Each structure stands twice: as structure tokens, then as C-alpha cells.
Amino acid sequence: MIAVYRTCGLALAFSIAAANAIVAETLPQPTGEVVLTVTGDIGVTNQGNSAVFDAAMLQALGEVSFDTTTPWTEGTQTFTGLPLHALMEALGVGEGTLVAKAVNDYSIEIPVTDAVEGGPIVAYLHNGKTMSVREKGPLWVVYPYDLNPDYQAEVIFSRSIWQLVSIEVKSN
Amino acid sequence: MTLHDKMPKPARRRLRGLPILVLTATLIGILVFSLAITFLANSVQREVDALAVANSDTTQWSLVQTEVELLALQVAIHMSEHQANPDLAEIRRRYDVLYSRIRLIGESKQFTELRQNPEAARSLAVLTDFLDQHTPAIDGPDSALIAHLPALGKAVDALRATGRDFSLLGVRFYAADSDAKRQGVASTLAKVGYLTLALALTLLGGIAILMVMFRRSIRSERLAAEARNRLEEVIATSLDGIIAADADGRIIEYNGAAERVFGYTRAEAVGQDMADLIIPDHLREAHVAGMKRYRATRKRHVLGKGLVRLEARRKDGSVFPVELSLSAAVFGRREIFVSFLRDISDRVAAEQELIKARDQALAGELAKAELLAVMSHEMRTPLNGILGTIELLRDTNPTPRQVRYIAAMNTSAALLLHHVNGVLSMSRAEAGQLDLSPSEVDPASLVQELVESQRHAIEAHGNRIECDTTTAPDRIFVDPLRLRQVILNLVGNANKFTRQGEIRVECDHVPGTRLVEFRVSDTGIGIAEADRDRIFEAFKTLDTSYSRRAEGTGLGLAISRRLVAAMGGEIGVDSELGEGSLFWVRLPIGLTEPQSKRPPAVKRQTLPALHKVPKRPLNVLLVEDNQINRLVARDMLAKAGHKVLEAHDGREGVRLAAMQRFDVILMDISMPELDGVAATRQIRDGDGPNRAAPILALSAHALPEDKQRFLAAGIDDIIVKPLTIAALQQALAQAGRPQDTGAAEGIAARFADLCRQLGRDKAVALLTAFRSEGETLMTRLQAADWLSVPTNEQADAVHKLAGSASVLGAGQLREGLNALETAYRQAHPDPATPRLAEIAAVWEAARQEIDGCLGTQGIVQTNP
């Protein structure tokens, strides 16, 4: 536990430094339809206490792509999206828990510690195409299950929220 | 060092072989089990993972969510029924969510198994149909959707039961599936469990074996340690120095005894070269060479040869004798030499001491024996003189009183001689010089004769004597003189120690053996048990009472014992103090077969009468250095009518013998300068007139080896001193028989011999030279002036011709010339003169004979 705290402490120190760097940048206002609303303990906002994003803004924040299988699809899929850690950096979030919510009222907590390089992304393209709500879109938190065996776990599967619409950041 | 060797071999093999096999098997078992367990564990892992994925809560949640989302759509539709401006966005969103859910169930691999369930497939088909029917309306314009809402509401209502069934079916299906999967996992886990158990057992087995091996190795280590300790204890406490060296001769082990022996401490010795340390300089080269040779050839000299005596050097440089045992042992590739060394200085010193003591003792014994022999001899010579003189004295018409004195003197002198002879034969026997001349003897008559000869003396002593020989063997093979000596001694002893008693002499064949037993018993004083062994020892007379009652040197029994032992027999005594004694002698009969009775051995010829005049008087040369003995012998000879010429020593004897011929020469043996043997040899080897004359030795020695020596020198017979008239007469009778002289041989016969031996020419030359020589001498002899001046030159010339005459067989001439030579040498020209005519006559005869021989060769003598 002490080790965990220490790690958390370190992470906090880094995140504060990162937040300071990002604070200068301000989020632009969305021009298209808002696809994601982030509320809670965030360092950067663009609409009241919230940070709202249209698809273009998300795309502008970062884009990575990987191939993996998932329990919910047949065959290998290609997912493209914004790395969760990039989103957290953009919002100046270094710690805490993300409470993610979906259109279908599904809700799950994702610890900010999950947001790492090579970790989950907020996918907006599935096999190169945007996703409709009927296709679990428009946003889907996907982990690279095949690249990291640690992600072949029930907890991770439960965090793989689709039809994502909002995130509430809770600091511990 | 030989610990490993101490363990019994089979045990070692067991320790090496079996457990290793078992251990290998165990290890293989462990490996197999481990692989199996790993494989199963992987499989469990996979199954557990699969279970985790397949049976995830989200799967069931998704199914239930279908119903929830259907309800959400139903609520959204019903909420909008009575509103003028229905919330179409909400309806569309709920529809899309439901749509997404149904698509998920229809496509996701999570639901592959479920989809294969017919009931589920039917429900899924109903749901899919619903989507197919209503999606166009949803996707259509708002007006169309509003118009379609009632139908949609009904359809959704109708679908609720299906949704409900579907989620319940999911619950049932996944419960069963999960059970099956759990059972699979449980079974695999059970397998893992069994395998783990087996692995654990195998491991336990392995541990048990390791424990056994461990304990065995502990035990063998303990045994080895014990053996090592024991060995070290042995080495440390060994009285022998123990030094072990490697192949280069460097000391690697050195014990406490070695420290004491050599003076080096262990620390000083170990690592040093053995050669430098303890091998003395004079042996080092040999040692180094030996080591080199052994290394090169493996041939062992000292190695393994048991105890060897060598010398070693101490730290202080002193060299001392050691006893060494060296062995080589091989440990692996290393060879070591182990030496056991013992300081034997003390022993060697003791040995030398013993040798010295023995040498001294032997020298003492020898000196004693020599002293006795010399003393006896020296005493016998005057004794012989006394005895001889007494005998002569008897013939001088003594008065009766003088006769008694003479008899007393004779008895005393004879007794003294007896004692001296006893001591002498004792010392001879002591020196192992006993000589036996065994012959066939009739023991019965020997005993009877002996008893008869002693009867008078015994009865004079007041005793009676009996003899029983009824069971005696007929014949035995012994030295009769020695046997008689022994029995006589026993009878004499019996008589000495018995008063008014009886003495018995018996002879038996010991039944069942090849032994004859002689017994002499008496009823005398007896011998105490404690003394029975002592009486057989030399110079032992028993207590004072014994010596008071009996005189003696104490040698009788000791000599008897030695004689009996020399004859291969035994002597012993049984006795009761005060009741008498029984001495017995057992001898081997000595004859393999019982002999038939033979006429008794020829008795010695009756000795000639004392004054019997010989057939013819003999011309005797008496060679004797002792004046008294010479006087005695001369008088005895003269009395017997012989003519005696005396020589005072050997040299004179030889000289006289060269001058004239004697019928017999009596030669004393012990004389200073030239003894009798050497003198005889000179006479025999010379060409004098007596080279063939009988020579009789006069000697106190009558030992066989002496006899051999005498005979070899040319002595014809031996008269053992003391000289008696009887013995002298007998010897002379033998010697005085008419002899063949050289003349009997004749010149002709001799000439024939010479012709054969030398060849005719040489023989003729010899004879011719002799004739010429003889003529010349005869001419000279007849010249009056030459005759009147006798010189040694004349004697020599006569002697020379006599020699030639002897060689050429002119015996008579030789005798004549010898007499003439004697006359010249004695400076008596007158007595010689009448002989000249005789010699001339003899020469004439000889010359004619020579001419006869030569004449056949046509050689004519021309001038005188």
C-alpha cells in the first residue's frame, strides 16, 4: 500500500507538472456535435465546469491505432482513437477515477492509472469507419487486449465501455 | 591413507551402484511429474481463463440488459403516446441502444454457444425480425415515425415476453454451462492434485533415498574416521619408526617413534629428502641408484623383501644399525613408500656380546680340553717310564720284600695311568672325538666273560655277583671294547657302593624293539633322587659320604653316558636310597636280521712269554727322545736278545737309518723338532737302506685319525704306550719276519722294469753308468791311503752308490754299502775295513749280473 501511495505521489507530482504545462492551452469550443462531455475535477474546461468535445477535437488531441480481437466481435478488429492518457493530459488530470457513462445507461469506473502509453484508447474509428450508436459508437473505450495479456481480464472487459458519452473525473 | 580400502568392497559397490540407480529413477520421475503438472496447470490456467471470459458477468448482464433496454424503449414510446410533441430523439436513442444490444448478441463470439441453443435462436430470430420491421420507420422522417409509434408500441409490448424469456434462458444456459466448465476445471484440478501428490511422494522417496545415502556416507565417514584414528594411533604409538615417502623420496609421514629414533622432529622431517636426512653417506649412492632403478624398471630389491638389516643416520650424525621393512603402496596415480625402521643398536650390541661370550666360552672349553689332553699326555710319558722301569725291576732278582714294594708301585702307577687315561678319554669324548669300531658281538658271552673276570675282585669286597643272559639276543653290532668299558664301569661302581650284597648283571632283548638292554643292579647304598641326574655329569662325585667310601675321578659315569650316546643308546638309573641301584643301558641291536650263531670271535692270540727268545735276534733302531723311556725300551729289547742302536731324536734317527739297514725301527711319535711322523716320512722318501724297513710307532696317541696319519707317513704299526714286553714282543714278531729285500728283486728284473718304464736306451745308460761308478768306487776303496783317511766325502760317495744300488735292485750291494757308510760316518775305519772284502765280493757278483744284462746288448766292459 505504501508503495502504491508512493507511486501515486510520484504520479501526482508529474501530473501537476503536466497540468501546469497544459493549463496555458485552452480547449477550443466544439464546432460539431458534442460527442463527449467531461466533468468533475479537471484542470481544463471549455464550457462551464465541463470540457466538451466534438469528434474533430478528439481527433486533434491524438490518434493511435491497433489491431486486436475482442469478446464482442468476430475476428481481428482495427481500432483507431485518442489514447486515454492523452485525453487525461489534455484535461490536466493526473489521478483519480473516471466514472464513464454510456448512452445505454451503462456506467463504470476507470482508474486514471489505466491511462498509460500503450493502454486504452477512446476509439472513434472501428475498422476505419466511424461508429453509429447501433455499432457501439460513436465512442468506445478499447484496450489493446491482444497486445497485453493483462488486459485479457474481466475487470478490463467491464471497463471497455461503448456508446461512451460522458466522463466524470473524481479525484481521490 | 587406506581408508577407502578399509571398507568392505561389496558395501562400497552397494553404496555406489544401487542408490544412484534409484536416485536417477526418482529424478526422472520428478521430471515427468513436474512436466505433467506444468502441462495440466497450463490447461487449468486456460480453462480458468476461458471460464472467466465465457462466464463473465457482462455476458449475462448483456442478456438481461436486452430486456431492460426493451423496457426503456417501451417506456419512451408510452411516455410519448399522449404528448403532442413526442420525444422522438429519446425513442430513436432507445431503439438504437436496443438495436446495438441485439446485434451484439447476434454477432459477438461471447454468445456463440448460446446462439446454438434452438430456443435462444428462436428468440433471437423474433428480436431480429422486430428490428427488421421497425428500423425503416425509426430511420424515416419524424412524421412517419409518429404515425408508426402505436404499431411500434404494440410490437414492443408483444416483444416483452420474448425479452423476458431470453434473459431467463440466458440465466439457465449459463448456469448449466458454468457448472460443466467448473466440473471440467475441478477434474483437471483433481488430476493436478493427484499428480502433485505423486510428485510429493516421489520427492519424499527421493528424500528418503538421499537420507539413506546421507546416513550411509555419515556412517562410512565415521568408520573411515575411526579407522584413520586407529591407524594414526597405531602409527603414533608404534615402537618402530614409520616413515612414508613419495616417489621422489620426500618424506610425507613421520611418526613419534621415528622422532625418537632419528632425533628429527616431525616438522623438521616432513618434506625433506629421505636420502639427505637419514641415509648415511656410504649408503646414499646405493639408495639413490636403487630409487632410480625402481622408478625406471619397477624391479624391487629391498622393497617387499621383509626385514632387511641396514644402517641409518641420526640427526647428530651417528650411524646405527636398523632393521628395515619397506613396502610400496599406490594411491590413485601416486606411489608412496612406507618404511618401518627399528633401531637395533641394542640388539646388535647384545648379539656381539653374546658372540664374544660364546667365543670366550668356546676358547675356554678348547683351552681346557687342550690342557687336559696335554697334561694327560705329559703325565703319561713319565708314567710309562715308571711302569716300564718297574717291569724291568722285577727281573733284577729282587728280594721278596722288594717284590712286594714293586707290586705296590706297579698298582699305584697303573691306577694313576688309569685315571689319566680316563681324563684323556673324557676330554676326547667332550671334544666329540669318540671313535667306535663296531663289530658283531655275542652279548651273552661278553657279559659272562666280564662277570668272570670281575668275580674275584667282587668277592674280595665281600659281595656276590650273578649274571643272567638267558633272554639276551644272539648277536649285536657294537664296539665291544666300548661296551665292555661301560659295563665294567657300572659293575665297578656297584661293587664300590655295596657291602655284603649282591650284584646282578643281566642282558635282555627289549620286547617289541630292536634294542638290547644291559642292567647292572646292586643292593648297595642307593642314590637319592636329586642326585640321579648329576651322577652322569663330568667331574661329579656325590656327597662326602660317597667320596669317603669310594675313590674315583668321578668320570666313569660321565664317560659311560657319552659312550652310550655315541653308540646311539641311552643310559639311566633307578634307585632307592638304602636299598640299591639299577643302572640300565639300552643300545640298538644294530643288525637288521637275527644272525645265526657263529663261532665266537677269535680271541686275541696268547701273548708270547715274557722271556721267550726270538727265533732270530733283530737289529733294532730305537728312536726316542725321552731318556727313561729309551732306557726301558732298550733294556726290554736287549733282554729279549735283540741288538739295539739308539737315536736321541728324530734327526739322529733319520741319519742312522740312512747308514745301515735295520730289521725294525721303533719310532717315538712325540719328539721335538723332527717328530716320529716326519722322520718316518724322510726315511721312506729317501733312498737309504731302511726305506722299506718296518717302522713301528711308539705312541700314547691311539686315536683313529692319528693312526691314519701315521700309516700315511709309512708307519707299519703302532705300539700304544705304556710299552710292555708283551706288546713289544708281539710287534717285533710281526715285524721280524723274513722280508723280501731289494736283492731278491735282482738286477735283471729291475733292469727289465726300467726298460719298460724308461725305454731300453735309458735303462742301458743308467746301468752302464752304475757299473762305471761302482768300478771307480771299488778301485778307490781298495787304495790303502784313501781307506786310512775316512772322510765325509768317502761316506757320501759310498752313500751315492748305495742309492744307485737301491734303485737298480742290487740289494746285497746296497746293504753292504750302507754298513760301510755307517762305519765311515761313525769314524770307525777299522771295523769297516774287513767289510771291504765282502763288498768287493758282492760288487763282483753284481757286476757280473750287470754284465749279463748289458751283455745281451753286446756291450763289453773294457777297463777297470
Image: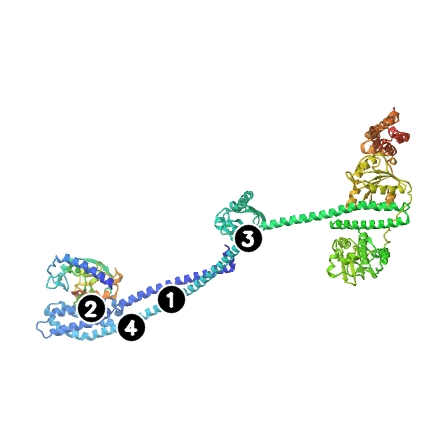
User: Looking at the picture, how far across and down is residue B715, in whole percent?
Assistant: 81, 41
**Is the residue at mark 3 from the same chain as the one at mark 2?**
yes
| Residue B256 visible in the current orientation | yes
Give the distance between the C-alpha atoms of the residues marked 3 and 4, in whole angstroms.
Answer: 93 Å
Q: Earlier in the sequence, mark 4 or mark 2?
A: 2
Q: Residue B524 carries which label?
A: none
Q: Label 4 near label 1: C-beta < 8 Å?
A: no
Please, which chain is the residue tagged with disc 1 on? B
Would residue B727 be visible to someone looking at this image?
Answer: no
Tell me which label, 2 or 1, sits earlier in the chain: 2
Mark 1 → mark 3, Cα distance in angstroms: 66 Å
Kindly identify the amino acid type of the residue bearing the numbered disc 2: Arg
Between label 2 and label 1, give the one nearer the viewer.
Answer: 1
Task: Name the residue carrying label 1.
Answer: B195
Quarter-of-image position of residue B122: bottom left
* Residue sitting farthest toward the front: B401
SS for tag 3?
A: loop
**Relative to B111, residue B671 above or below:** above
Determine contact: label 3, label 4, CB under 8 Å: no
- Relative to the observer, which residue lies in front, B606 or B74? B606
- Counting the numbered discs, the total is 4
User: Which residue in the protein does label 2 denote?
Assistant: B101
Say few, some or many: other residues with alpha carbon within 10 Å of mark 3 (under 14 / 14 to 19 / 20 or more). Answer: many
Q: Dot 1, crowdedness within 10 Å: few (<14), some or many (≥20)?
A: some
Residue B176 bears which disc, if any? 4
Q: Are marks 3 and 2 in contact (CB under 8 Å)?
A: no
